[in-house]
Image (cartoon, rainbow, N blue to C red):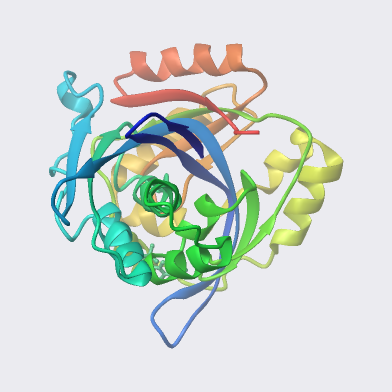
């Protein structure tokens, strides 16, 4: 997360994530699922700007970047009220700190919604970290992590200092993961999205025997050629059952010279791992040529 303060505003970049490994271990009594996942932040960003508000209100304005192309517009408008995670994060921090200050927040959306790329979670994390600075609250990382866990499972990952991590439990138990190489991706999102609760509901937990440790060992020790054979996402099968566009993306990717490919999170975005940035650009052009509506090249954040 990058912060750029100016005299009276603060701008924060909120990255997207991709799940390189996602195993659904079991369904829990609280309705959530225990996971083993490896997430990596990538250089596709939403931008949030925080400015003073004369009133004590939290006001959010959402601008969609690059929506002149009709196919890249979201089907439903992004909410700007209390059902937006950014507003909820700001309100939670304001209540926690017991302050009367308000804020005007401008969110420029580039990360597609309902795509499994963590856009909403990353925006919420950027709000907690950004407003902690903007309101000069000096809340500890531990306190922010606690607030993050109240808001959603993935938010702690984006608050953490590490751009790649193994996340367990509901997603909130985060172990930083360092590995030497940059990873290059081509990321595609079909017209439609998927609801995360619906995909988890459709999923059968505990079907994959292979745990995250083998994947992590490979990523650290055995190189990309070996690691791509261990890619896993237990949510892909249920997502394909619910949304045929995910299956169609898998078929497109299986004909491309990527090192490995799979869906991210609960979908519907899909990524291929490429040998180089140049190869990712070539593959992105091929996906655009067959009509995939949203295609981007990305690399893992360092
Ligand atoms: O925590 P978050 O709000 O991101 O989760 C959205 C929904 O995804 C949850 O309400 C739940 O249905 C599902 N989920 C789950 N297990 C997880 C994370 C999310 O079942 N570990």
- Residue 282 placed where, x, y %? 51, 11
Against 162, is 301 above or below? above
Tell which of 133 and 205 is nearer to you. 133
Q: Quadrant of the C terminus?
A: top right
Against 104, is 189 above or below? above
Tell which of 38 and 11 is nearer to you. 11
Q: Quadrant of ligand 1?
A: bottom left
- Residue 284 placed where, x, y %? 45, 18
When asked about the image quadrant of residue 46, the answer is top left
Using residue 43 as the reference point, say whether residue 81 is left or right of it. left
- Residue 167 placed where, x, y %? 60, 61
Q: Residue at x 43, y 29 (%)?
A: 252
Q: Residue at x 76, y 33 (%)?
A: 225
Using residue 31 as the reference point, say whether residue 38 is left or right of it. right
User: As drawn, which residue projects farthest toward the right?
Assistant: 221
- Residue 260 placed where, x, y %? 61, 35
Number of marks:
0
When asked about the image quadrant of residue 88, the answer is bottom left
Q: Residue at x 40, y 31 (%)?
A: 188
Tell which of 40 and 260 is nearer to you. 40
Using residue 246 as the reference point, say whether residue 176 is left or right of it. right
């Amino acid at each position: 997360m990058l912060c750029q303060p100016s005299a009276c505003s603060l701008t924060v970049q909120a990255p997207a994530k991709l799940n390189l490994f996602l195993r659904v271990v079991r369904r829990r009594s609280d309705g959530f699922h225990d996971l083993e996942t490896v997430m990596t932040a990538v250089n596709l960003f939403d931008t949030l700007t925080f400015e003073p508000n004369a009133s004590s209100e939290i006001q959010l304005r959402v601008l969609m970047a690059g929506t002149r192309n009709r196919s890249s517009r979201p089907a439903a408008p992004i909410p700007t009220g209390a059902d937006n995670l950014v507003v909820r994060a700001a309100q939670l921090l304001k209540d926690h700190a017991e302050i009367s200050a308000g804020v005007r927040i401008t969110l420029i959306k580039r990360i597609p919604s309902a795509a499994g790329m963590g856009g909403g979670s990353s925006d919420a994390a950027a709000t907690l970290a950004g407003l902690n600075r903007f309101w000069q609250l000096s809340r500890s990382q531990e306190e922010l992590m606690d607030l993050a866990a109240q808001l959603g499972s993935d938010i702690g990952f984006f608050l953490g200092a590490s751009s790649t991590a193994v996340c367990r439990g509901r997603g909130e138990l985060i172990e930083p993961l360092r590995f030497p190489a940059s990873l290059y991706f081509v990321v595609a999102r079909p017209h439609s999205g998927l609801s995360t609760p619906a995909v988890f509901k459709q999923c059968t937990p505990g079907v994959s025997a292979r745990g995250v440790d083998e994947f992590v060992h490979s990523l650290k020790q055995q190189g990309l050629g070996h690691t791509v054979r261990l890619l896993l996402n237990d949510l892909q099968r249920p997502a394909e059952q619910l949304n045929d566009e995910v299956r169609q993306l898998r078929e497109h990717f299986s004909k491309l010279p990527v090192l490995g490919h799979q869906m991210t999170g609960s979908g519907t975005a899909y990524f291929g791992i490429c040998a180089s940035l140049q190869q990712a650009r070539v593959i992105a052009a091929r996906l655009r040529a067959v009509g995939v509506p949203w295609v981007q090249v990305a690399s893992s954040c360092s």
